[in-house]
Image: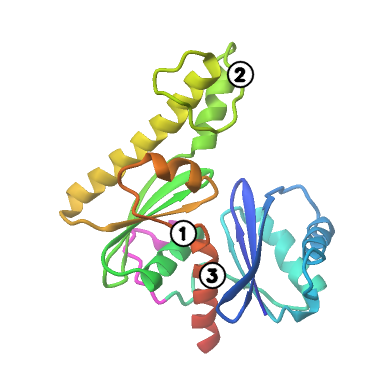
Amino acid sequence: MLLVIDVGNSNTVIGLYDGDKLLHDWRVRTVVNHTMDEYGMLILNLYKTTKISSKTVSDIIISCVVPPMLNILEPLCEKYFNVQPLIVGPGIRTGMPIYYDNPREVGADRIVNAVAAHEKYEGDLIVVDFGTATTFDYVTKKGEYMGGCIAPGIMISSEALFERASKLPRVEFGRPKSIIARDTVSSMQAGIIFGYAGLVDGIVNRMKAELKSVPTVIATGGLTKIIAPETKTINIVDEMLTLEGLRIIYLRNKEK
């Protein structure tokens, strides 16, 4: 079986594949100061929630935007699974031309998302990934990664509001009843949710205008379900897009 690990700045998403079927997926916090053994025990405990032995893992692929985490995960894979993991980075075979001024600057997660989106969907595509940062990436119908833009994530924005405005509380993400709210918490929720939906629509529409085409817009990431329903431009929600991209890239490198 294949274990796929996507390490983000806030969360790490882990998936277990049997062939092309995703059997289980888990989301845990990314904590750089955890030790290798702490993460190893965490993953083994996640396995205990299933009826599958961790010994069934034969291959592992990792996408990571937090470099220190690789110092934890690589030896972890060798110690607990006896597997040398495949790391998504320069030199790996993705099957996708990357038209970025410096391809090494592109986050691994952005490329993984682009590969999965092109494999699963037709035509020109814009991939929106709601993570610690929100990324917008354009992929041509030929399967070329053309670049995109990066905006502060919704969690960063809401935390900044709480930290910088002394009288404003920390609020949960939730859709308020009205944009004209009548209490402080609802007012903040309205500004955060509806405001961020406007940011997404604004950036996507600007990309469409520059492209002079109508690409399909695919959303992924942990906060997709909260924001996507409030937008006018998102066509498809695919929460497991990154895990699927890791599986596809693993297969392309295994064939090599």
Give the residue at x 32% y 71%. Answer: 143
Mark 3 lies on a secondary structure that is helix
Residue situated in front as seen by the camera: 248 or 189: 189
Give the residue at x 50% y 75%. Answer: 249
According to the image, label 1 marks what residue? 238
Q: Earlier in the sequence, mark 3 or mark 2?
A: 2
Asked if residue 96 lies in the magenta stretch, the reply is: yes
Number of numbered discs visible in the structure rendering? 3
- Horizontal relation, residue 35 to residue 210: left or right: right
Q: Residue furthest bottom?
A: 255
CA gap, disc 1 and disc 2? 32 Å
Q: What is the number of the mark on residue 169?
A: 2
Q: Of tags 3 and 2, which is closer to the observer?
A: 2
CA gap, disc 3 and disc 1? 14 Å
According to the image, label 3 marks what residue? 246
Give the residue at x 59% y 47%. Answer: 9
Q: Give the vertical position of 14 relative to 152 (above or below).
A: below
- Residue 90 coordinates in the image, percent (x, y): 49, 69
- Residue 154 coordinates in the image, percent (x, y): 49, 36
Q: Which corner quadrant of the image does residue 231 belong to?
A: top left
Mark 1 lies on a secondary structure that is loop
Residue situated in front as seen by the camera: 23 or 250: 23
> Badge 1 local density, few (<14 within 10 Å), some, or many (20+)?
some
The amino acid marked with disc number 3 is Leu
The amino acid marked with disc number 2 is Pro
- Residue 83 coordinates in the image, percent (x, y): 73, 78
Q: Give the vertical position of 170 relative to 95 (above or below).
A: above
Q: Give the extent of the magenta segment.
A: 95-107
Give the residue at x 39% y 30%. Answer: 195
Q: Quadrant of the N terminus?
A: bottom right
